[in-house]
Image (cartoon, coloured by chain):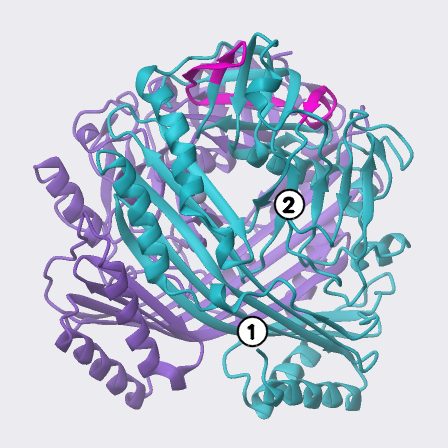
Chain colours: A cyan, B purple
Amino acid sequence: MISKKIKNIFHAVRKEALKNKVQATLSYHREKSHLMRIGNNSVSLNTSEDLIRMDIKVNIGRKQGTHTQMGDITSETYAKKALHLAIEKTKNSLDLDFDPIPDVIEEDFVQKEQYDKKLETLDPAFKQTAYKKIIDTFGSGYNFSGSWSSGSTENFFITTQNENEAYHLLTDQNFSIVLKHPKKMWELTSTQTGWRKSDFKTNGTIKLFKALIPVYEKKGGFKVKPGKYTIVLGPTATAEIMEMALWTGFWGRTWEEKRGWTTNKKPGDKVLGSNITIIDDPENENTFKFKFDMSGKKRKEFHICKSGILKNLMYDSQTAALFKKKPTGHNIGSMSMTMKSGTGNSSFLKEIKDLGTVLYIPALHYINIPNPSEGIFTGSSRFNAVLIKKGLIVSPIFSTRITDTFQSVFGNVKTISEESVSVNLSNTYGRRSPVAVSVPSYMVTEGIKITDCADSF
Amino acid sequence: MNEGIKKKIIENIDKLLAKKAEYVDVRLVTEDNSESIVLYDGNLEGNDTTFENGIGIRTLFDGAWGFAATSNLSKLDECFDLSFLNAKSAAKLVNVPLKMGKKKGHTGSYKSPVKKDPFRVNLKDKIDFLKEIDKNLQEEWIFKRYISANMQKKNQIFFNSEGTIIDRQLTDIFATMMVMGIDNDGEMQRRSHELFSYGNGTRGWEMLTKPDLFSSHSGRIKSELASLIKAESLKYGKKSVILLPGQGWLQVHETIGHPLELDRILGYELSYAGGSFVTLDSFGKLKYGNEKLNVSAYGGFANSPGSFGFDDEGSPERDYLLIDKGILVNALTSRAMIREANEKAGRKVFSESGGAARSTAFYRAPIDRMTNVNILPGKDGTLENIISNTEDGIIVDNPTSWSIGSNREHFHFGCEIAWEVKKGKKTKILRNPTYQGHTVEFYNSLAAVGDKSTWRVGQVDNCGKGEPNQAMELGHGVPVIKFDNVITGERK
Ligand SMILES: [Zn+2]
């Protein structure tokens, strides 16, 4: 938890900014991160990082600049030096041709409801024991690899606009394991996420592998011919396609600049199928909850797409200033994207027993967007992907490429699962900043284009 | 270097050796600065700096790595202890012990060739320079303009328990300019240019201000965009594809570089980046491409982000062939990975580390990365020669999208622009080009490799890999390359 001393330093820097007649946002970010990697049935890396960053954003009239410093934030002189660096670079910059909207913390915010001390201080032995149990259950005849990230993220910020403080403390974990057959080369995976230590259950992974291994052991890979198929998309695939559809279709910036697939549509127009509803819901327990964004704006339930109708576009404050719109609480921070569940039986095999040939693709590897204007995305199957006939799993499928549009995938959904699950979409490229979305455990979508398939998994 | 800290580091390394650590290495980063300037439609939307410093410690104990990092140097002793404890707890689950082998300690230093440190150039001068280019990009019909420059400077000292001490000062500079326009169907098209080099010269601020490498391309991308927004879309079909270096570097990156990272081949990257279709058995045997394909690592370039003197294990960067006349002969390697590979293969597949163990920050442990992965110039002449020998094809440049199979066995790329080639002549510009293929089949259909006049070094500042994730800088020297019988465009 942030100490009184550091808070005082931030307030002293705020005073210094006011004295210098500049607008400033002063943020503190601390991560206590742990990650265990598994490779070749062994722990290949066991790493801990304790990192503190100070972010300073300065506005002087229409000029702006930011400076981030990682190092000794326990000294007031050091912190003030960082402020002056930011002021200096802002002074030397250019006037924007629009008036930036200053950060304002709308009320005092304190949020730590998703904090679990047990997860923050988790002994690496806990992870190692769990991995060992899974490996021992199936034997080292298979090749296991994986990674398990856990830790806490603490955000605190103040602005020169008022006296309010914003504070957020969160723990999160992101577990993955891959089981690979060393000769046949197929791969299975299991992932788990959550903010509590108890969200992880070794048996969940064991149960999943036990269900899939017999199919993979008995049958060779199926090479899918290019063409149109009925596909059951699992939660990870749904989450990733949804995330890309949101970036290219529902962001104010993309829309205003005519770069996305909703360019010729406006709020009130039908853009997806009538059974698709997407909400940014900061109260959703399947997501990492933020009741404010990084500009200090209060966040509440925000309808993006309701029954296929484009309801609202998301604006960060820079885009809002540029295009003379109102910010919607979408300055970087964790969003709580939620795709509403449907009425499908929670077991998709039961749900699709009358559908004939179906491909189950739970996740897509390396999705990208060759044409955002037309909403075309592409990605290929990898883990746990199988061919199903009349509700029975027939065989695993080789690495299979889908190239289709967001409008088609979310426009031809036949069934949506009644069950919602959490998918962790965090990465660890920059600072720790956990993000998870809530999606149905599966959706059945028809007429989806398969454009290529390898001769191997 | 502060002698007090140096002494403390060496004492702590000795302390861990006394506790039976097999190997320890330390990266003390005294300065890791980056600056990013972004002009969007003339507005300075990005004016950001980040300064980092700290220490990262890696300990090998009983065949397992522990790592710990801190930005607070007053906690140095604790950080060493934590790294050791992490290794000890990791060692409780080891089936394949990692080994570094024994090497003699050595000292060394490296400094990127720089005339003008970009961090000592006034911000105002940097902005003025970019603003001038922005002015040249401005036209009534151009919808959006984008210019960015990204500068990096890292000073670090490497220590290991063998007594090696390496001092390095790395400077990199990256830049992009882009223009966007609305086509006949109301869709956005774009054309861009990225700062590149010919493999020699210096890499300070002066590199960016050399007109032939950057600013002089503004007129070209504008006129190409003007044609692009009036062009028709590329149709689905099978034809020759000629990759200009602006696209060729990514083709090499994704389908030669990544699959040849030894940690990927050994299965250490499966849960995130993926595996490789290459196996230990492939070395010396696999016909990766036809005899026109020669691929090297490092290439001895003076001024590429993939040239760094010594890697993050203190091994010197080596210049060697990865693919020799189409045959796969080597990989991108680090010390522990080559030992494990040789043991697994039961033969000496790799003789020494390729100097490719790299980490992006003091708080990340090194993994096998690309340095500069290059296709060597060939004997098929200039771009004009290659075009004149093409019956039915397209020329493509600059990626917009890339999606690759998890074992790098197949790929799909989208590019900014294509030029149709019919009967040896460049005819018209086509928009929304894409092409796809299967890696080994594709490189075996390599039909032409351009000469040195077509060759240039592309710079990459965002190659993602590893857990925790690391975005790395590297380079690719590539000539113009042509492939036959490639699927282009999208099936209806
Ligand atoms: Zn990469």
The reply to whether dot 1 and dot 2 touch (C-beta < 8 Å) is no
**Relative horizontal placement of residue B358, taking residue A114 as reference (left or right):** left
Q: Residue A124's spot in the image, x, y percent?
A: 35, 62
Magenta extent: A387-416
Q: Is residue B218 above or below residue A101?
A: above
Under mark 1, the amino acid is: Arg
Q: Chain of mark 2?
A: A
Q: Which residue is mark 1?
A: A53
Looking at marks 1 and 2 on the same chain, the residue that comes earlier in the sequence is marked by 1
Q: Is residue A88 above or below residue A294?
A: below
**Relative horizontal placement of residue A52, taking residue A289 as reference (left or right):** left
Question: Between B219 and B35, which is closer to the camera in this rendering?
Answer: B35
The chief SS type of the magenta part is: strand
- Total number of numbered discs in the rendering: 2
Q: Residue A89's spot in the image, x, y percent?
A: 67, 75
Q: Please give the name of the residue rendered at 50% of the width and 27% of the height, measured from the top-left corner.
A: A380
In which image quadrant can residue B394 be found?
top right
Q: Quadrant of the C terminus of chain B?
A: top right
Q: Residue A416's spot in the image, x, y percent?
A: 68, 27
Q: Please give the name of the residue rendered at 62% of the width and 88% of the height, measured from the top-left corner.
A: A4
Judge whether residue A398 is colored magenta: yes
- Residues at marks 1 and 2, CA–CA distance in whole angstroms: 26 Å
Under mark 2, the amino acid is: Val
